[in-house]
Every structure is written in C-alpha cells, then in structure tokens.
Image (cartoon, grey):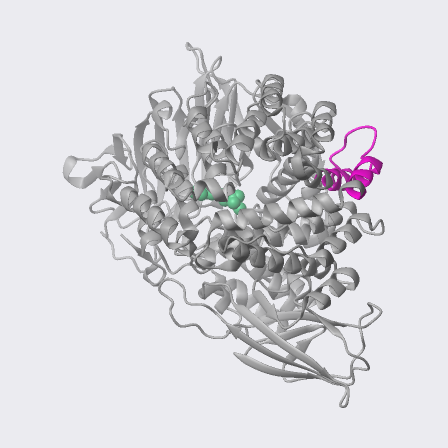
C-alpha cells in the first residue's frame, strides 16, 4: 500500500495522556497502557477509534474501567478498533504481552546483551501497544517500569524520575518516570538492565542544573569520557549558537550493541549504537572520535529540532533530520576546522547522496509517497536535506537566516509541523518569495550547472553563460529550473580576488549569484585583468558543476584560490578527469598516460607547510572508485576504474617516493595521543603519505608500513597500516591480521574493523574469504554492526568484487538479503540498497545485477522493507 502526502488528515481522536505500566520479563513482558482519549473538534460522535498495532497480542481491554464486550471492538495483531467510542473524553486501558527475546527486528521492545531497550522511530511504538502511532499525536507520558532487581537494577524512562521502590513480597522493583513535554510516540523509550553509570552535570545558561548520565555495559566506563565531553560541548554550543537550552532535570544516554541505526533522540533518554559512544585511543580511530562528536551533537540537537518541534507526518522527516544534520555540521565546524569539515561533508554527500539521486532509488528531499518509511532515512533526506538548509542561509544571508530560525522556534514550539511552515518563517524574516526555492524539497535529482565563461580585454567584461538542467528521476520526467545560490570569485594572476564594477543578468546577494532561470547570461563589468573564475565556492549548492576551465586553470586555483574548498575541489577535478581518461584507456587495453602536472601538484600540496595537515591529507586523497564510476555515469567497468586509480596511485608513489617518505618521517603527531583536530590532522596526513608508499611498485616500502603497524600506539595508525598491508597485498598480511585479532578479540568494535578490512580488499579471492568469514565464531547475522562490517562494507566499499563480472558478488549479497529478511527487514533492506547504481554498469554486469534483483523479487513473503527497495530498484 502506498501512503501519499496529499492524503494527510488529522486523526479523529487525540490522546492527551499516556500512562504505561511495563512489567518486564525476557519472554513475556506485560504492558498496560492507559490512554486519555479525546474526540477532536469536527469528529462526529461515535466515529470508530482505530489504533495501530504490529505483531501485538492483546490480553486485556477496558473502557472507563469496564471490560469491553466482544462486539465493542475488533482486534488483530496489527489493528485495534473501538467500534463506537463515547462522545466524551474516555480512558482506554489496553494490556498487551510481548516477547522481547524473540524480537529480532530490533524495533519496539527488545533485548540486546541482556539489556531491555526500545526503538520506536518510525513505527515501533505500535509493537509495544496499540496506539495512534503517528507523529502528530502528542501526549504526556508517565511510565512505570518494573523488573527483577538482579536482572535490571537500572530502570530508565523519558523525562524525570518521580518514584522508585520495591514490589513488596517479590524480588522485583520499579521506577516511575514522567515526561512533562507532550511528544509523539516515536520518541518514547525505556531501558532496563544491569548497566554501569558514568555521571556528570551541566548548568544551563539560565542556571538549571542538569544531571547527565551515560549508561554502558560494565567494563566500558573508561570509554565514555569523550562522549560526555562532546555532550557538554553540544549543550553549550546550542545555547550560544541558537539560544536553545535543555529543558529537563536529567539527560541520559544508553549505549547498546545491537542497534539498527546510529542513534535515537528519545526525549531525555537517547539510545545509541555503542559505536557512537565508546572510544579510547587503543580501539577507536580519529574518525570514530569525530563521528561520536557528530552523532552525540546530532541527537542532542534533536531536543529542539525534532522533539520540541516535531513532524506533522513522516513526509516531513527532513524537517527534523536535514535541519539537525545542518546543526551538527555547524557544531563540528566550530569545534574543528571549518574548511576541513566542509570538504568531508561534501565528500560524503557526493559519495552517498549523488549516486542515490542518480539511480532508481532517487526521491525528493520531501518524498510524496512511500511504502515503507524506514527506507527513507536516506542520504537524500539527511545530507541533501542539510544542504537545502545551508543554501537557505547562503541565499538569504546570515541575518535573515538567523531571524527565520528564531521565528521558527518561537512560533512552532510544541507543534508537529511541516516544511511549508518552516519555509514561511524565512520568507517572513527575509521578505523574499521562496516559492521557487521550495522546489529543492520537491524535485529529485542532482542539478547540472554548466558555466561557460570568457574575458574580453577590450570591454573589460567577464561574461558567463550559465545553464542548469535537472535530470529526470522516477516519477518526475520533467523538471522546472531551480533557485541555485552560486558563490563565485574572480581570481587574479597573483591569487587575489579581483574587484569588479557590477554584476548584470542575475540577482546577487554578496558574492552569491541567485541562479533562477534555465539560462543566464551574466556580465561582470570593470574587471581589470583576465581572471580565473572560482565557481561554486564552499560548495554553495548540491549540484554537479561543469565548466570550460582547463587543467591549467584548475591547477592554478588549486594553488591560489582563497576559498579552501575550491582549492581542494580543483585538484580533485583534475584527478577525476585523469582517472576517467585512465579508465577509458584501460577499457581499450591501453596503459593510461601519466599526468606529470598532476603529480607535481600533489607534491606541492604535500609539502606546503602553510596548509593545515588535515587539508593536505584530503587534497592528496584520490577520488574513490565509486566516485569515478558515478562521474562516468553509464556503461561503467569497475575493473577499468580500479586499474586507472591503482595506476595513478602507483605512479605518484613511485615518482614521489623519497619526498613522501621524508615528509612521513618528519611529521610528528605528539607525545601523548589526543583526538584533537590538530593531532588527528597530522595522523591523517602521515597515513595518506604512507598509503601511497604502500602502493609503490613491488612493495618497496613494505618495511615502513609493517613498522608503522607494529609501532602504532593508537587505533588510527594501527588500522590505517593494517588496511595498507591487506589492500596492497604486502608481505605479512596474515600475521598482521592475526596480531590485530588477538589484540582486540574482546573489543567488538575493533573486531568489526577486522572484518571490514578483509571485506574491502579488491582481490579476486575476497568473496571466498568473506564466505568463510561468515562461519567465523565472531560473526553473527544477529548483530547489525557485524553484518554491516562484513557484508555491508563489501557491498558498498568494494567496487571491483561486489561488481564481479561473473555476478558472484551480486548473488552473495542477494542471498544474504533474503536470509536476513526474516530476521531483520530493516537491515536487509539497507543492504539491498547497495544495488542502487546497477543500471550504470556495463551490459554484462548490468544483466548479472538484474538477475540477482529478480531473484530477490521472486521470493515469497518478502518484508515490506525489502519488497519496496527491490521493486523500486527494478522499476
Ligand atoms: N532519528 C534518528 C536519527 O537520525 C534515526 C532513526 C532512524 N530510524 C529508522 N527507522 N531508520 O538520529
Ligand atoms: Zn536525526
């Protein structure tokens, strides 16, 4: 069944209060829900009340404390209808019985390593009790949780703790939690288990004392320091940047090891995948530390953008997700290097969202229809959604943007609202018409901007012809022109930004051209000398840029642009063009030409000590195989792509070997490990240089890499070196793998890395190894992190082997999806979306991918999750 945006109607009833009494037991938990139900204005008396359920077992039902007769209701596992409810407010009491141990979908109430926990977004609350399980039904929750004291000494709920005690005459105890803030059911949570607590506190700007707690499995207390530090910095930052304070006396975070996604912003009780909480230098990389910072901030920021102001319906998901990603990006930029953060975010966008937008799973930032909402927690909703908010800021300027945000918080606090309401705040604060801008939420596909420019010395004019085009996407064959903020600069011969007289042919805000038409002719007057245009500075819009700039122009920008993003981008563009040429050469059986200018540019960035090491590391990293494939766009041969990339990497390594080696040895990251941006940047640069060296002809620098592995006193270096040894096929590979395994056998998150490094090796025997690894005692299909570490990493991070020409990679992933679907549909569907670019492959692989998808499609009783992905993929 398809759910459509235009079919939205408010619910016939409201539920103002929810009282839950949850009696926990591993195989038979009882939930008594007492709902205060009100008929909404406009609902005719006697209108049936229809509640959502999913796999529920009803064991008791009363209305105003009277047991309901069999003809007064209709109940199935996924629906409860009260046939003729009273016209006046009433109390509905529902008792359900759950089996947390049997819940392998990890939605609703389940157990992870003996800890009871919940996940309700998007539609998991209906697996706990019958409810109006939709985000526009806001209720005040009181939750009593009861369990055996020894089994679950810790009992946690949303809001503030109001009572605790023993249940007389039993070995059980209880806790009562009350959350005064009305919230939708997807923000409900409870946790119970034998957990260790790491405590701290935070005083808000207005002086409210907040108790902070991070709950983890015993033994992990030492690994919570970083997460706690991130939490406190997030709380301060939201006060300073947005004037937003925390609003309860307690803020708790719980880390669990079995979790379908990253983390969840339940009111006052965030539940996290433990990989986004636990860190110490020995088991977490700098990237892990940065991810923890981002995710802790993200979930905390949801308290305002998501919880205080929530979504009217799930089509509005980007209202909270895109905005909250934008906020966590801004936070990380302020904590670290802004340009480096921007480059990393754009890399992520291009590698995850652009391919999604270019394939059969493309959808608008605000979809208009869905079959399974869980499949829309996508890079488009999150990352492109954040770009749209960022463009709004670029388009309107900082002040109007800040005023719009302030208005949004003032006007919609306590509401479940929409993208239209959000945009209205900015239209009002800026006085601008945002009708065209709103197309960013409606039209899928990555716009292509073509800029053809030239300088006329006679008239001193710089003339730009700009054309935009939005490609067709599923159900959207025709597109309208978009409102695109194009930030530009004119770079003069000495690298300075040139002055100019004026800009004609387009609306301008500062140095941002507001592109609105399919075509513009833009004239910039009074330009004294021939400039090189720096286009799309700071990646001012999520578009694909084409221009008539040549390699010399780009290399000039790579050296001189004062916009660091474009310095990085210019070099990437040159490398990408070389790699695309190299891939065509490989298809034709030729050796790609070396590009000495490019190699020279790498040398110069590597050695430029005026630049941040983190930036130099990013500038030296070659575009990934998937990025090259996306840029090629059709008839892709992943082996040719890999051959071209390996060739460029090897020739660069061979010709810069001694320089890179000298730089590698001269760089020092500091006496004691710290995850600071400064130290992490130095490690990133060292490891990037060493990665080139690892790929020098004949394993010539193997000793250096093995030494780096042996001597590493932190996970960043150890894991980087292990990747090099395994992926470059250096001597000592098996020894290094077993050393790593033995050292970390008790650290699940490190063992995930051990699986991933093997899954991502671009070698012909990788698939056989992966098959063997699925039988390894440490592997489990029940743990989502493990599945993603081995099979997810293979499907999304191993271009040559997943896309094997014999189709064996596709078949393996398809078979895994089918096996997994019965256990955990969400994880299965996510894995299947690795096929998102199958149509861009050359014909032989394309046919093999289609056969694998058809096999999935043909299976009986697919989950809605997998059914939805497979049918859209084949459309
Ligand atoms: N709201 C969570 C977050 O972004 C993610 C929840 C994902 N839920 C899902 N059903 N996929 O922080
Ligand atoms: Zn989120």
Front-most of residues 620 and 197: 620
**Would you say 669 lies left or right of 235 here?**
right
Splitting the image into 4 quarters, where does residue 74 fall?
Answer: top left
Question: Residue shown at 78%/52% (left/top)?
Answer: 605
Q: In which quarter of the image is the C terminus?
A: bottom left
Splitting the image into 4 quarters, where does residue 8 fall?
Answer: bottom left
Give the residue furthest to the front.
590
Residue 643 appears anywhere in the view: yes
Question: Residue shown at 79%/53% (left/top)?
Answer: 604
Where does the image place residue 558, in percent across and percent down from the top left? 74, 60
Residue 666, magenta (yes or no): yes
Where does the image place residue 660, in percent across and percent down from the top left? 78, 42
> Compared to 263, does 538 lie above or below?
below
Question: Residue shown at 28%/33% (left/top)?
Answer: 56
Extent of the magenta region: 659-687
Residue 702, magenta (yes or no): no
Magenta: main secondary structure: helix
Residue 780 appears anywhere in the view: no
Question: Residue shown at 40%/30% (left/top)?
Answer: 109
Q: How many labels does the image show?
A: 0
Front-most of residues 842 and 697: 697
Where does the image place residue 789, in percent across and percent down from the top left? 50, 33
Front-most of residues 737 and 314: 737
Where does the image place residue 226, in percent across and percent down from the top left? 69, 32
């Amino acid at each position: 069944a398809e759910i459509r945006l235009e079919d939205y109607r408010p619910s016939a009833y409201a539920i103002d209060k929810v009282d839950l009494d949850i009696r926990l037991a591993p195989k038979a938990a009882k939930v008594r829900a007492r709902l205060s139900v009100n008929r909404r204005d406009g609902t005719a008396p006697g209108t049936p009340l229809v509640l959502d359920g999913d796999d529920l077992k009803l064991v008791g039902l009363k209305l105003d404390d009277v047991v309901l007769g069999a003809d007064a209701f209709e109940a199935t596992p996924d629906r409860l209808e009260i046939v003729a409810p009273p016209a006046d407010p009433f109390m509905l009491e529902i008792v359900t019985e759950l089996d947390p141990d049997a819940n392998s979908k990890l939605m609703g109430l389940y157990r992870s390593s003996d800890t009871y926990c919940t996940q309700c977004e998007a539609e998991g609350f209906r697996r706990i009790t019958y409810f109006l399980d939709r985000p526009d039904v806001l209720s005040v929750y009181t939750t009593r949780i009861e369990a055996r004291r020894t089994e679950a000494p810790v009992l946690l709920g949303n809001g503030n703790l109001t009572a605790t005690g023993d249940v007389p005459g039993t070995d059980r105890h209880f806790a009562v939690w009350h959350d005064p803030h009305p919230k939708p059911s997807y923000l409900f949570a409870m946790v119970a288990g034998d957990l260790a607590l790491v405590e701290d506190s935070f005083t808000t700007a207005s002086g409210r004392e907040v108790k902070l707690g991070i709950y983890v499995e015993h033994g992990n207390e030492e690994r919570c320091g970083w997460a706690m530090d991130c939490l406190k910095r997030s709380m301060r930052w939201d006060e300073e940047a947005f004037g937003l304070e925390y609003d309860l006396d307690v803020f708790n975070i719980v880390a669990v090891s079995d979790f379908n996604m990253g983390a969840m912003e339940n009111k006052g009780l965030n539940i996290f995948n433990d990989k986004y909480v636990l860190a110490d230098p020995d088991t977490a990389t700098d990237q892990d530390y940065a991810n923890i910072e981002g995710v802790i901030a993200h979930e905390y920021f949801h308290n305002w953008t998501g919880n205080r102001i929530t979504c009217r319906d799930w089509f509005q998901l980007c209202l909270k997700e895109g905005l909250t990603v934008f906020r966590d990006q801004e936070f990380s930029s302020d904590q670290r290097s802004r340009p480096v953060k921007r480059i990393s975010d754009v890399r992520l966008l291009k590698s995850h969202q652009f391919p999604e937008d270019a394939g059969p799973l493309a959808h608008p930032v605000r979809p208009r229809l869905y079959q399974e909402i869980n499949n829309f927690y996508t890079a488009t909703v999150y990352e492109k959604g954040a770009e749209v908010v960022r463009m709004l800021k670029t388009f309107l300027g900082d002040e109007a943007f800040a005023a719009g945000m302030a208005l949004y918080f003032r006007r919609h606090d306590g509401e479940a609202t929409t993208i239209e309401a959000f945009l209205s705040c900015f239209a009002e604060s800026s006085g601008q018409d945002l009708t065209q801008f709103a197309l960013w939420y409606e039209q899928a596909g990555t716009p292509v901007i073509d800029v053809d420019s030239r300088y006329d010395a006679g008239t001193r004019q710089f003339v730009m012809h700009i054309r935009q085009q939005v490609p067709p996407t599923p159900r959207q064959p025709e597109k309208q022109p978009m409102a695109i903020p194009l930030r530009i600069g004119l770079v003069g011969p000495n690298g300075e930004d040139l002055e100019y007289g004026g800009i004609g042919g387009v609306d301008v805000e500062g140095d941002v051209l507001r592109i609105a038409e399919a075509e513009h002719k833009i004239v910039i007057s009074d330009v004294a000398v021939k400039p090189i245009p720096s286009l799309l500075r700071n990646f001012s819009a999520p578009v694909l840029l084409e221009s008539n700039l040549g390699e010399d122009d780009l290399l000039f920008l790579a050296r001189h642009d004062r916009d660091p993003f474009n310095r990085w981008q210019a070099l990437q563009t040159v490398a990408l063009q070389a790699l695309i040429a190299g891939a065509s050469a490989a298809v034709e059986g030729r050796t790609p030409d070396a590009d000495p200018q490019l190699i020279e540019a790498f040398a110069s960035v590597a050695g430029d000590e005026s630049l941040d090491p983190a930036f130099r590391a990013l500038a030296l990293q070659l575009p990934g195989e998937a990025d090259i494939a996306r840029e090629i766009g059709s008839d892709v041969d992943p082996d040719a792509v890999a051959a071209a990339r390996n060739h460029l990497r090897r020739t660069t390594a061979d010709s810069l070997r001694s320089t890179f080696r000298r730089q590698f040895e001269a760089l020092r990251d500091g006496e004691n490990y710290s995850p600071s941006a400064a130290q992490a940047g130095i490690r990133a640069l060292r490891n990037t240089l060493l990665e080139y060296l690892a790929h020098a002809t004949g394993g010539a620098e193997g000793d250096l890499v093995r030494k780096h592995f042996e001597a590493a006193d932190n996970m960043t270096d150890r894991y980087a070196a292990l990747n090099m040894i395994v992926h470059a096929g250096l001597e000592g590979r098996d020894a290094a793998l077993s050393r790593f395994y033995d050292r970390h056998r008790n650290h699940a998150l490190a063992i995930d890395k051990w699986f991933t490094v093997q899954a991502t090796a671009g070698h012909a025997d990788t698939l056989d190894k992966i098959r063997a690894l699925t039988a390894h005692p440490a592997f489990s299909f029940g743990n989502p992190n493990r599945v993603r570490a081995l099979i997810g990493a293979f499907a999304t991070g191993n271009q040559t082997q997943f896309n094997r020409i014999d189709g064996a990679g596709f078949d393996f992933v398809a078979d895994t999806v089918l096996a997994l679907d019965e256990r955990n549909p969400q994880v299965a569907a996510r894995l299947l979306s690795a096929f998102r670019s199958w149509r861009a492959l050359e014909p032989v692989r394309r046919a093999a991918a289609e056969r694998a998808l058809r096999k999935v499609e043909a299976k009986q009783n697919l989950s809605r999750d997998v059914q939805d992905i497979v049918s859209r993929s084949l459309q």
